[in-house]
Amino acid sequence: MQFDIKKIVRPNIEILKAYSSAKDEYTGEANVLLDANENSLGSPTTKWYNRYPDPYQTKLKEKLAFIKKIEAAQVFLGNGSDECIDILFRTFCVPGKDNIIICPPTYPMYEVNASINNIDIQSAPLLPNYQLNVAHIEQLVNDNTKIIWICSPNNPTGNSLDRIDIETILNHFNGLVVVDEAYINFSKQKSFAQSLIDYPNLVVLQTLSKAWGLAGIRLGMAFASKEIVAYMNKVKAPYNINIVTQELALTALEEVGQVNDMIMHLVDMRIALAAVIESMPYVEKVYPSDTNFLLVKIPNARGLYQYLLTKGIVVRDRSSLENCADSLRITVGNEQENTQLVDAMAAWIDLSFPDGAV
Ligand SMILES: *Cc1c(COP(=O)(O)O)cnc(C)c1O
């Protein structure tokens, strides 16, 4: 393995002199702050937000590093993991030249961001059992392949990907391997965040949007080597995480117990919901899930999707994704929402069948 981050980073980012914010240029205890053109009189809010936030989110990173048992310099924070994904493209992939590998059906943002950044997309679809096709991935790799995107547990299929397969890719590929663990808190699998020491080419993505119940504050995390994080810091906007988010996240991270209770409750409800849905006569399959959602295969998925809409219930039709025909992705709701969903599904009669019922 001859991984060399200098060969992976975009040459213009390697030589980039990053923007130096007002906050970068002094260290120590200044109390007359006339350097950033802020409004020194205050804000029209009870609590003042007239000062720019800490560009490096030092306190928040220290807390996350403590929780994840890594160093603060190995943490990058984004406005959702979606920003981390975009920054990875802009730091490591040369537009019009480099390519990435995705394994569909998977989270569509890898593809969207690749297209925005004019990066060629190579596709190694998951096998019929929704596991990685390692041989296909290895065939696709060429000198311009910068990132392999792996989502585990995978969205929308719900399953965790085989750890040995991911390790094989990490060991054989000289570019970056991003493991998106947005749903790791619902899974029995071990996070790759504790394996950074073994793999200089590993980037782990996590988020406060799912298990932590904080999708509204937008906080995503990338864990990687210090060198990778330092390059990403050069590319991000100086104040990408606002003060409100930094403060709320710091408070929320104290509540690990409460979050673990919610995770256990959601997993129990997922198991119960899967059993009920699986018992419905028209349901072909409920895929095993390591997440807070279920992928359900139904002959007329579109018909059920539209019927549920008439009952005010929105699920996600994933039928258009590769290898995902006739499948709805259903998030586990609260008790009342799950009951409404089950009642509506039980009442549905599939009119696309000749005899009007199944
Ligand atoms: C929801 C989701 C994200 C997005 O997370 P944000 O932090 O809210 O941007 C990332 N990856 C996967 C696989 C997701 O399902």
Image: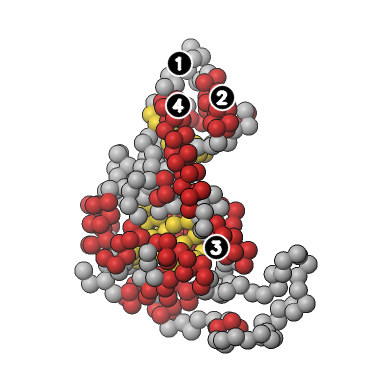
The residue sitting at 55% across, 27% down in the picture is: 339
- The image quarter containing residue 70 is bottom left
Amino acid type, mark 1 = Val
- Compute the Cα span from label 4 to label 1: 15 Å
List x then y, in percent, for residue 345. Answer: 52, 24
Amino acid type, mark 2 = Ala
Q: Is mark 3 within 8 Å of ligand 1?
A: no
Residue 23's place in the image compared with 250, above or below, is below
Q: Are marks 3 and 2 in contact (CB under 8 Å)?
A: no
Query: Which one is nearer the viewer's eye here, 322 or 91?
Result: 91
Most distant residue in the top direction: 355
Q: Which mark is residue 250?
A: 3
Q: Identify the secondary structure beneath mark 4.
A: helix
Q: Are marks 4 and 1 in contact (CB under 8 Å)?
A: no
Q: How many C-alpha atoms fall within 10 Å of the one at disc 4: few (<14), some, or many (≥20)? A: many
State which tag comes first along the sequence, 3 or 2.
3
Quarter of the figure that contains the N terminus:
bottom left
* Pointer 4 residue: 277
Q: Kindly report which numbered mark, 3 or 2, lies closer to the viewer in this rendering.
A: 3
- The image quarter containing residue 158 is top left
* Pointer 2 residue: 344
Visible in this render: residue 76?
no
Q: How many C-alpha atoms fall within 10 Å of the one at disc 2: few (<14), some, or many (≥20)? A: some
Amino acid type, mark 3 = Leu
Q: Kindly report which numbered mark, 4 or 3, lies closer to the viewer in this rendering.
A: 3
State which tag comes first along the sequence, 4 or 1.
4
List x then y, in percent, for residue 49. Answer: 69, 69
* Pointer 1 residue: 358
State which tag comes first along the sequence, 2 or 1.
2
- Compute the Cα span from label 2 to label 1: 16 Å
Q: Is mark 2 within 8 Å of ligand 1?
A: no
Q: Identify the secondary structure beneath mark 2.
A: helix
